[in-house]
Amino acid sequence: MKTLTCILFLLFLTTTAVHAQSDSLTDQAYQDMASKICTCVNANSKTVPVKLKAVIADAVNDGTDLGQAFVKYVEDNPKTGSNDLETLVKLSDAVTLCTEKLTEIYENAGSEDMQEMIVQKLVEKMVLEKGCSFAYSLVFLGMQEEK
């Protein structure tokens, strides 16, 4: 599952922020990007069980290893756990489509040189975005995987 988290994050990163140069994007542009990412994740994560979203959020908040959290989730939910985790794979596929649209908007905004600063600004906006906690959790976990 670490790979899935990393893939989700890389999808966000490579198709939105990585193409945008920090100096060429306004504060509002970052807010718009954050809003679009959150909207996309929320629209496509309706099949992800609330309990599983909570496991992911708790892993972010507590610093728990996500792989261990998923193992515990499956153990605690033996009938549905594995299928629930499959919803994250489907989410990854759906988010790919959303981020392709964002790529069209931001791909010519600049270079990859300022990637870390760009992602940080984007995450700062996601924290402030209402209803964005699940998307934020995925991006945060992806950032941790990259370190």
Image (spheres, rainbow, N blue to C red):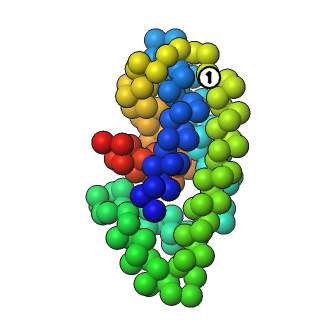
At which x and y percent is residue 15? 58, 33
Look at the picture and state if 41 lies above or below 13. below
Look at the picture and state if 8 lies above or below 21. below
Q: Which residue is mark 1?
A: 106
Mark 1 closeness class: few <14, some 14–19, many ≥20 residues within 10 Å: some
* Quadrant of residue 119 within the rendered picture: top left
* Quadrant of residue 58 within the rendered picture: bottom left
In the picture as drawn, the residue positioned furthest to the front comes out as: 3
Identify the residue at horizontal 34%, vertical 47% (top origin): 144
At which x and y percent is residue 21? 49, 16
Classify residue 25 as left or right of residue 61.
right
- Identify residue type, mark 1: Tyr
Q: Of residues 133 and 12, which is closer to you in this image?
A: 12
Identify the residue at horizontal 55%, vertical 77% (top origin): 82
Quarter of the figure with the N terminus: bottom left
Identify the residue at horizontal 64%, vertical 38% (top origin): 99
